[in-house]
Image (tube, rainbow, N blue to C red):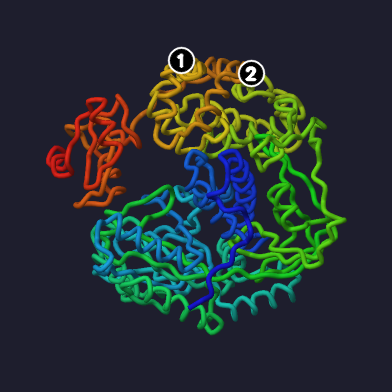
Amino acid sequence: MLPRRKSQKEPPVSGLSALEAASEASDLRAKLKYHDILYHQKDAPEISDAEYDTLKKRLIDIETAFPELITPDSPTQTVGAKPLKEFAKVRHAVPMLSLSNSFSDEDVTDFVERVHKFLNIPAATAIEFLAEPKIDGLSCSLRYEKGKLVQAATRGDGEEGEDVTQNVRTIKTVPHALPKDAPDILEVRGEVYMTRADFQKLNQAQERAEEKIFANPRNGAAGSLRQLDSSITAKRPLRFFGYALGETSEPVSDTQDGIRKKLSQWGFEVPAPAKVLKSADDILKFHAQVYAQRPDIAYDLDGVVYKVNSLDYQKRLGFISRSPRWATAHKFPAEQAETVINKIIIQVGRTGTLTPVAELEPINVGGVMVSRATLHNEDEIGRKGVYEGARIIIQRAGDVIPQVVRVVNPNPKKLFRFPDKCPECGSKAVREEDEAATRCTGGLICPAQAVERLKHFVSRTAFDIEGLGDKIIKEFWDEKIIQTPGDIFRLEKHAGALKEREGWGELSVNNLLESVEKRRTIGLDRFIYALGIRQVGQATAKKLAAHYESLGNLLTQMKAAATPGSAAFQELDNIGDIGLSMAEDIVAFFAEKHNQEVIKDLRQELTIKDFARPKTVQSAVTGKTVVFTGKLSRMGREEAKAHAESLGCKVGSSVSKNTDYLIAGEDAGSKLKKAAELGVKVLSEDEWLEMVK
């Protein structure tokens, strides 16, 4: 078996305060988003997969421990990046989601245990998992109708990808027609890739032609597939592996392995080696075998994927956030290299957090040129003894931003001194007690914070205003065209001047104004998220919207909650996963006069729709609030919650006077006592299932 992944010396998540966690999560999200764009849109990553995975794993750990920090645009909640404008867009009939990552033996064992627990299947009863290599290529979906290839699309952001049909038709291993036993509608999901040998030949040809040299086979495949001229793609040695299905007009198999065998019969290449396994021990042995074979495998792979084999179990397990509960990618160990820190710069985020970033002597780590690495915060610099000019070991752990592992030549006298003033506005930078982050006190007078808040406001998972990218927001801020969110919806008065801007013209301005107009109506949950409230991410914004249902009611209740110890504050604190620290931040945001003015201004410009609950099966318990406690015997706790939500229930985490039913399994504890005190109706698991059948 492989050695277990070593700690990277970050403070354990369990030891972080809520404020420390919020600060680090914000830093991680910013870095990951930056590298996501480089990787998914520009095919030009600055760091390795291993480094990216390490950062993302850390963010997942923090968001798991502090779910109130989850934001809708967090890399843990999104897939890939938006399609490039040069390509036509394709809306995926079935979203193309990403996989959660496992980095250690313990992570894999936990994954297997979670599957057993969710399905309420004893550990001694085997569950089959299909294990197959994780190819380092570009995800692609091929759509067949009546046996003919009619469309091909990249994954994009998971919901919408790029139309690359003509380019995919040039790939020799992609069947253009399927046998008669294939469904009338069939979407084959897989990976476009290059073998290492073909990649070397391509780069040699590129060098002779004085054309772009690709950093690694994945970049070569992505750059070749996303050519606007399909004749160029046709000259590139691309291949395609099929491993999953999207939309189908009829079932293909009842197992993942059955799908794999069908794809092979229909002429698709499938990843190898692959095996159906029945225990965590067998899975880990297979991972070690594939890792040992890795140098001899013709193409790049960065881990092994495990999928629950039964499609019925997959359906029951469902999804969490942007990943399936029934699959995980077990990554290979990180790659390291030695380089020098040329300079340390300080970046200022939208909440005022000062983040140190090391500018490095460029170094190739596992096939990717790395020139920057995050240093997280002042404590991280102190722990590792970082200074300008230091020789350091950096590590790729994920496919995006690199991490400093250690300093090779420590020198305490040269330790980098963290600034006490904001580099953007000169305001005092302070570090509050019990916080890891140092923050600028300049607030909205700090251009970095104001601009970052506006970028967040128009981001894809907030208002999603096309045409207002980071560069344009910064330019409009500098020119005082946009100073507040409300100014975005008054851009029309600048139309004449905008048309005179270099590179713009009437069409560009009209497109921008049209994009703005399309966003004058927005759902309450997205509006709350767009406000940029500290610690409030996508999940929390939805919970607030679902609980208060309208903006008017939310504002009324937040005003009441400003009174310490009030019933309104307790109500906010009791919403699932909203603890004291987050509740205080939410109340503080709505109590701040400037924020009140921003919201008042926006209400004059926008239509903010009341929260629309997802469509559910109408039942006897639709609209009821339920809480589960104790050990359930007929299904796992998480499956029971998911089932209740599908019936239109609100699932609470604690019992209150607003709870309609407490479903009590074996060994029910304090919640049962609380229900008795409040007169909440208690149901056994059997009584509950009888009620909702």
Q: From the image, which quarter does the C terminus lie in?
A: top left
**Which residue extends farthest bottom?**
296
Q: Nearer the viewer, residue 449 or 16?
A: 16
Secondary structure of residue under mark 1: helix
Contact flag, marks 1 and 2 (Cβ < 8 Å)? no
Q: Which residue is mark 1?
A: 556
Q: If you read the primary sequence from the N terminus, does the residue marked by circle 1 or circle 2 appear first? A: 1
Q: Above or below — where is 682 with respect to 99?
A: above
> Residue at 59% across / 23% down in the picture?
489
Amino acid type, residue under disc 2 in the picture = His
Q: Is residue 169 visible?
A: no
In this rendering, the count of numbered labels is 2
Secondary structure of residue under mark 2: helix
Q: Nearer the viewer, residue 610 or 692?
A: 692
Q: Is 413 left, or right, of 682 in this rendering? A: right
Amino acid type, residue under disc 1 in the picture = Thr
Q: Which residue is mark 2?
A: 594
**Which residue extends farthest right?**
413
Q: Is residue 432 visible?
A: yes
Residue 54 x/y as whole percent: 58, 59
Q: Is 219 left, or right, of 78 in this rendering? A: right
Q: Which mark is residue 286?
A: none
> Residue at 52% across / 18% down in the picture?
562
**In the figure, residue 390 lies in which quadrant?**
bottom right
Residue 126 x/y as whole percent: 26, 69
Alpha carbon distance from label 1 to label 2? 17 Å
> Residue at 79% across / 48% down in the picture?
345
